[in-house]
Image: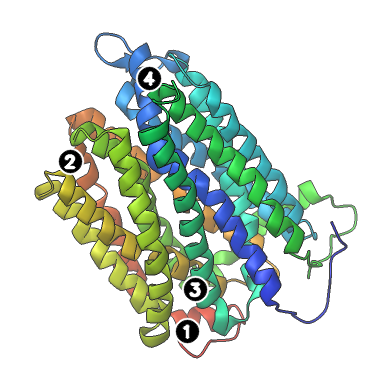
């Protein structure tokens, strides 16, 4: 990697496009692994190992087999809480953001490739590989998001962030389309069982992730740190020290803190819906793997246009109002699924509505938060942000898993997630965006 560059901001279209391609690369994990294949497949693996009452006993603990996957999502994020902020602080004191992004991207990609060996009753192997992959995914995204302030000026953040999300949906959708053709039309003719086809599809996500990560690593330029490492300090020690400093200083930026809390709440709901949607479809509605792939594939391509559309909407009504609108729709969706959804056709209609708001709510949240954090501390603050981003939320899956275990109803479990959208909507409505940006000393864009 080249030496860090310093001086005034130097924005380039070439670097922005390279940045987009990491969303293209890692979205294969979000779609093929989290959203479609791993939830139902790992649940079936756990069911193979379950006793007559439907329980498995990892480390001697009784776990309802159907709740294993949401519990694993929660566990992987609890682990991130302990080390992602440390990594973010270290990156802000060095020019290692790009290096860290690459290291964790390949940890995630290789763990995903290892899922090819998941079969029989190896639910422990599946759980371990998923935790490693999700940790690598979450950690790499911290440093990827932290580049947003480096590659785009304030007035362009919504556009660049939305186009990155759109590229992610397109990349994840293309690989999912390939897997759809393979599982539904080719595997049987080639003498490959559905289980083996699923394992091959899981591994393909790891290969896709590994190959396309090379593009951002080639195009993104390292930046010199604004802050200098103190005398006798090491990068590891300063990571712990700076984390404590950030947590103590965060209350000085009350509006940024309020936004972060709101985001952690409503994005927990978004990520839970994403991670359990295929599980709900397979277990509650009896949908097969092919139908679930078709649904998620449709969501990917509709979401491509939804992300771009919300980027344009933010120019007219502001980022905050656009996000608030999306949360109203998310809340309505969870209530509708609980009370009215009965058929596969309805499930597809709900999927299309989700697709429209999915990318917009997340892309605009990312660009808005980038304006609310102090210069030179992007990776550190985005590590706190990432704790609940994409497929790494923890409280929502925990609530879903507990509700499912206590009631045995997937509908009640999903309805419990509506509270995350309601609370997030209330908190976000109280955020003064202009004040948040000026509190940290950043430039206020023309439209917020």
Whether residue 241 appears in this view of the structure is: no
Rendered image: mark on residue 412: 2
Residue 29 falls left or right of residue 325: right
Return the residue nearer the eye: 174 or 433: 174
Q: Outermost residue toward the bottom? A: 446
Q: Are marks 1 and 3 in contact (CB under 8 Å)?
A: no
Residue beneath the point at 55% across and 84% down? 155
Provide the secondary structure element on which disc 4 rests: helix
* Mark 2: few/some/many CA within 10 Å (<14, 14-19, 20+): some
Nearest-to-viewer mark from 4 and 2: 4
Rendered image: mark on residue 46: 4
Calculate the distance from the C-alpha at mark 2 to the C-alpha at mark 1. 39 Å
Q: Earlier in the sequence, mark 2 or mark 1?
A: 2
Residue beneath the point at 56% across and 57% down? 23
Residue 339 percent across, percent down from the top left: 10, 49
Nearest-to-viewer mark from 1 and 3: 3
Residue 29 percent across, percent down from the top left: 51, 44
Residue beneath the point at 46% across and 73% down? 255
Q: Earlier in the sequence, mark 3 or mark 2?
A: 3
When asked about the image quadrant of residue 395, the answer is top left
* Mark 3: few/some/many CA within 10 Å (<14, 14-19, 20+): many
135 over 305 or under it: above or below: above
Rendered image: mark on residue 368: 3
330 over 158 or under it: above or below: above
Q: Are marks 1 and 4 in contact (CB under 8 Å)?
A: no
Provide the secondary structure element on which disc 1 rests: helix
Q: Earlier in the sequence, mark 1 or mark 3?
A: 3
Provide the secondary structure element on which disc 3 rests: helix
């Amino acid at each position: 990697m080249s030496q860090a560059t310093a001086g005034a901001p130097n924005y380039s279209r070439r670097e922005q496009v390279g940045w987009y391609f990491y969303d293209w690369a890692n979205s294969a994990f979000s779609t093929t692994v989290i959203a479609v294949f791993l939830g139902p497949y790992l649940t079936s693996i756990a069911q193979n190992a379950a006793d007559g009452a439907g329980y498995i006993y990892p480390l001697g603990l009784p776990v309802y087999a159907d709740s294993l996957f949401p519990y694993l999502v929660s566990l992987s994020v609890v682990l991130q809480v302990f080390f992602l902020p440390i990594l973010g602080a270290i990156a802000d004191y060095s020019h290692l953001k790009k290096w860290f992004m690459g290291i964790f991207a390949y940890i995630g990609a290789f763990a995903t490739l290892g899922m090819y060996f998941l079969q029989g009753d190896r639910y422990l192997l599946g759980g371990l590989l998923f935790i490693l992959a999700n940790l690598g995914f979450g950690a790499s995204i911290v440093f990827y998001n932290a580049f947003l302030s480096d590659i785009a000026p304030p007035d362009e953040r919504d556009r660049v962030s939305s186009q990155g999300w759109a590229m992610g949906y397109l990349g994840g959708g293309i690989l999912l389309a390939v897997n759809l053709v393979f599982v539904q039309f080719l595997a049987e003719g080639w003498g490959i069982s559905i289980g083996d086809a699923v394992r091959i599809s899981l591994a393909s996500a790891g290969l896709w992730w590994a190959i396309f990560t090379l593009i951002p690593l080639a195009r993104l330029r390292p930046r010199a740190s604004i802050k200098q490492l103190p005398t006798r300090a090491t990068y590891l020690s300063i990571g712990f020290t700076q984390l404590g400093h950030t947590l103590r200083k965060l209350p000085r930026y009350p509006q940024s803190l309020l936004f972060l809390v709101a985001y952690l709440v409503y994005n927990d709901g978004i990520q839970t819906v994403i991670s359990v949607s295929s599980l709900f479809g397979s277990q509650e509605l009896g949908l097969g793997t092919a139908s679930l792939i078709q649904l998620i594939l449709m969501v990917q391509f509709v979401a491509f246009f939804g992300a771009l559309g919300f980027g344009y909407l933010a120019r007219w009504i502001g980022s905050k109002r656009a996000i608030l609108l999306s949360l109203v729709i998310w809340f309505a969706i969870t209530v509708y699924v609980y009370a009215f959804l009965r058929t596969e056709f309805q499930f597809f209609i709900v999927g299309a509505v989700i697709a429209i708001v999915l990318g917009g709510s997340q892309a605009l949240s990312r660009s808005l938060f980038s304006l609310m954090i102090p210069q030179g501390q992007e990776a550190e603050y985005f590590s706190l942000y990432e704790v609940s981003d994409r497929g790494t939320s923890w409280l929502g899956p925990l609530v879903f898993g507990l509700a499912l275990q206590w009631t045995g109803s997937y509908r009640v479990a999903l309805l419990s997630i509506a509270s995350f959208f309601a609370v997030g909507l209330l908190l976000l409505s109280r955020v003064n965006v202009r004040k948040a940006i000026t509190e940290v000393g950043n430039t206020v864009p023309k439209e917020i």
